[in-house]
Image (tube, rainbow, N blue to C red):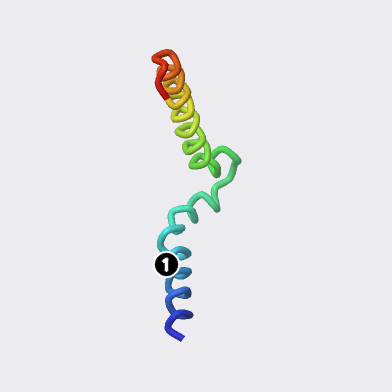
Amino acid sequence: MIVNNIWRATADFCTNVLFAPYDVFRFTEGWWSSNIVNAFFISIGFVLLLYWLGQLQKFRKAGTE
């Protein structure tokens, strides 16, 4: 019974605390205003991909792996 309560508490925490800021975006009108968080994370991922590719190129030129 205690295990069931732990899972319910975790679900309640995620739903009511962690995802609470996203309720603001849920009721906005327009695609861009609703997906600004996704665009932010995609842009960070793209910058990190470019950095990673630059580091691979640097190590390839140096001859190390």
Spot occupied by residue 6 in the image (x, y as percentages of width and height): 43, 76
Q: Secondary structure at mark 1?
A: helix
Image-quadrant location for residue 64 = top left
Spot occupied by residue 20 in the image (x, y as percentages of width and height): 44, 58
**What residue is shown at x 45% (from left), y 79% (from top)?**
3
Image-quadrant location for residue 35 = top right
Q: Which residue is mark 1?
A: 13
Residue 45's place in the image compared with 24, above or below, is above
**In the orientation shown, which residue stands out farthest toward the bottom?**
1
Residue 45's place in the image compared with 28, above or below, is above
**What residue is shown at x 50% (from left), y 29% (from top)?**
46
Q: Nearer the viewer, residue 48 or 15?
A: 48
Q: Nearer the viewer, residue 6 or 31?
A: 6
Q: Amino acid at mark 1?
A: Phe
**What residue is shown at x 48% (from left), y 38% (from top)?**
41
Spot occupied by residue 65 in the image (x, y as percentages of width and height): 42, 25
Spot occupied by residue 19 in the image (x, y as percentages of width and height): 46, 58
Q: Nearer the viewer, residue 13 or 31?
A: 13
**In the orientation shown, which residue stands out farthest toward the right?**
31
